[in-house]
Image (cartoon, rainbow, N blue to C red):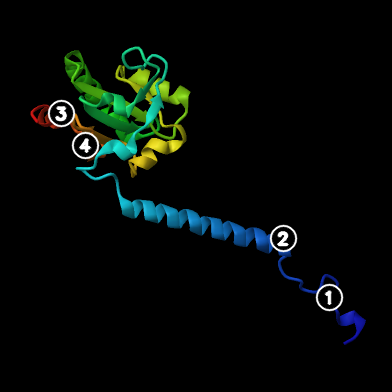
Amino acid sequence: MTEENIPENTAPNRGVPLWAQITIWTALVALLVVVFMGLQRAQQGHVPEGSKTEGFSFTMPLFDGYGYEGQSEIALESLRGKIVVLNFWASWCVTCKDEARELEEAWRYYQPGGEVVFLGIDYVDTEPEALGYLKEFDITYPNGPDMGTKISQAFRIQGVPETYFLDRNGVVKHVQLGPFSSTGQIMAQIESLLAE
């Protein structure tokens, strides 16, 4: 082969640089770990009915204007002796908006009796967006952020909205995956717990 037959732009093929290979493999391993952890969590499912919440005890800061009995934070343990409705929601969640008015209506019905406490747990959200949501739907029951998703991880929520009804002993009696279709649906769960 003579020099005149060699194409000008031909360079020896050296392959992908080592730093790029390391970066690609690291990213793939990280992705596999995330997928594996997600699959494990999905297989565990949410906290089942009949579970005691002793292992899920938490203290949560409450948004300004959404405190409980003058407190700026609330501990799940402090609500023993009351029926507790834990609602996981987010301002970006379309179906959360579908049930927001029903939850507020049920809260206003039961609040004067003092036997039932609603607690909204804002999931993966920003405070300004969350407060805008609460104002838009005229929500008055206690609400706060799930800092670092610790509460949602403890309850192994699968998405939002997700609502847990706890009896006076802190036992999960009903889990609602997805939005409620009516205030009556919420009240039926509460009435069954009040009758116990």
Disc number lying in front (2 or 1): 2
Residue 77: percent from left, percent from top: 30, 28
On screen, 10 above or below 24? below
Q: Which residue is mark 1?
A: 7
Q: Which residue type carries mark 3?
A: Ile
Q: Is residue 115 left or right of residue 34?
A: left
Task: Kindly check if marks 2 and 4 are in contact, taking CB atoms under 8 A apart as contact.
Answer: no
Residue indicated by mark 4: 171
> x, y (%) of residue 9?
83, 70
- Residue at position x 85%, y 79% in the image: 6
Observer able to see residue 23: yes
Dot 3 falls on a residue whose secondary structure is helix
The residue closer to the viewer here, 24 or 76, is 76
Q: CA distance from mark 1 to mark 3?
A: 81 Å
Q: Quadrant of residue 162?
A: top left
Query: Which residue lies most toward the bottom here?
Result: 1
For the residues carrying marks 3 and 2, which lies nearer the camera in this image? 3
CA–CA distance in space, label 2 to label 1: 29 Å
Residue positioned 44% across, 57% down in the render = 36
**SS type, badge 4:** loop
Q: Which residue is mark 2?
A: 19
Q: Which residue is mark 3?
A: 190
